Amino acid sequence: MAERILVVDDQRTNAEMVAGLLRNLGYDVQIALDGAAALERVLVAPPDLVVSDINMPLMNGYELCRRLRTDPATALLPVILITSTEAHTERIKGIEAGADDFLMKPVNWPELFGRVKRLLRVKALQDEIKNLNALLEERVRDQVSQLQRLGRLKRFFSRQVAEAIVAGGEDSLKPHRREITAVFLDLRGFTAFTDRADPEEVLELLRSYHAALGRTVDEFGGTLEHFAGDGMMIFFNDPFPVDRPAERAVRMSIALQRDFRPIAEAWEKLGHQVGLGIGISQGEATLGVIGFEQRWEYAAIGNVPNLAARLCGQAGAGEIWLDAQTEHDVAHLADTESVGPLKLRGFQHPVAAFRLKALKG
């Protein structure tokens, strides 16, 4: 598409002559016979360059240039001023008005054409930078929108699930099968605590418990499935795959016991005995969004999360119990002892189980 040039001169003959020569070079050239008409032309069909005479009635070239510079839309529009009076004084006035270039009459045509080409190249670069800035601003707006959406989703889903929704849409959470490591934990002595404690104390314990352990779960990249009173289900390797999910689960569980210890000690001083039990299992599970229109959850379904909950139910305060597959995967880094086979509700056959004693070394 040909660049558009606006020629401004109150002498129609001069304007037509300049316009004709520029059209011969392939430019799209429009004419305005005074400064006010030029401003109207700029609004209707924005040019890429203005070539204007200085000495015109009503609005001279300087005033036209100043008006263009005060409008953000035309602040960088290239302007060439042409005059027949004293060069030095006019050049200073032209620079002060914001002109980009300056020519004396009689016009040296090759010089005019050269300066037109130069300023149009400058305009093209300005437009490219403007487009790049607009694209960058749009990307920033999109990222801010995603961050805001992520912030809202985190109120209802774990960080990993919220990020999966933002990155891939809700389709990324359709029902699927995947091998996961599930971790279930709940409090020992919590029922007795709730029978004796005030409601405010019960909620205070839960708040400190959820806050401290929630930070640790996030630190290890676990997907927090749900809170169930004093119970908490976490799994690894979904919705995003992770390296060595069993090892992550064990290390996180040790950190959870460590982080809960100060909470337990604080309540012990008030006469309440509470502790944390943890169960870990590994295997293939069904995962996806469950619920109804007003309440959705991202859940793991099957024997793996059920077994983690059953092992947690068997674990004492401060203990971490593992199923056989998890124990096999962390045998190189953890000392364990057998506590099975166990007859567990919901499982037809006895289940091999192990108590985590310590990490090696």
Image (tube, rainbow, N blue to C red):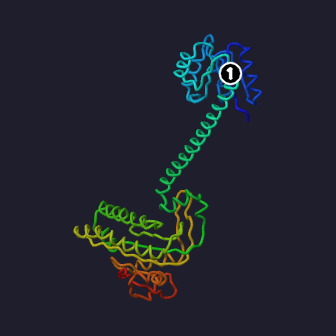
Query: In the image, is residue 205 above or below residue 19?
Result: below
**In the rendered view of the protein, which quadrant contains the C terminus?**
bottom left
Mark 1 lies on residue = 108
Could you say where residue 122 lies in the image, as x and y percent from the top left?
Answer: 61, 34
In the image, what residue occupies the spot 50% across and 83% down? 347
Left or right: residue 153 versus residue 175 is left
| Occupied quadrant, residue 198 | bottom left
Secondary structure at numbered mark 1: loop
In the image, what residue occupies the spot 64% across and 32% down? 118
Could you say where residue 183 lies in the image, as x and y percent from the top left?
Answer: 45, 73
Query: In the image, is residue 45 above or below residue 226?
Result: above
In the image, what residue occupies the spot 57% across and 18% down? 62
Q: Nearer the viewer, residue 93 or 208?
A: 93
**Amino acid under disc 1:** Asn
Query: In the image, is residue 120 above or below residue 339?
Result: above
In the image, what residue occupies the spot 36% across and 62% down? 211
Could you say where residue 243 lies in the image, as x and y percent from the top left?
Answer: 50, 72
Could you say where residue 222 lies in the image, as x and y percent from the top left?
Answer: 46, 67
Q: Nearer the viewer, residue 285 or 18?
A: 18
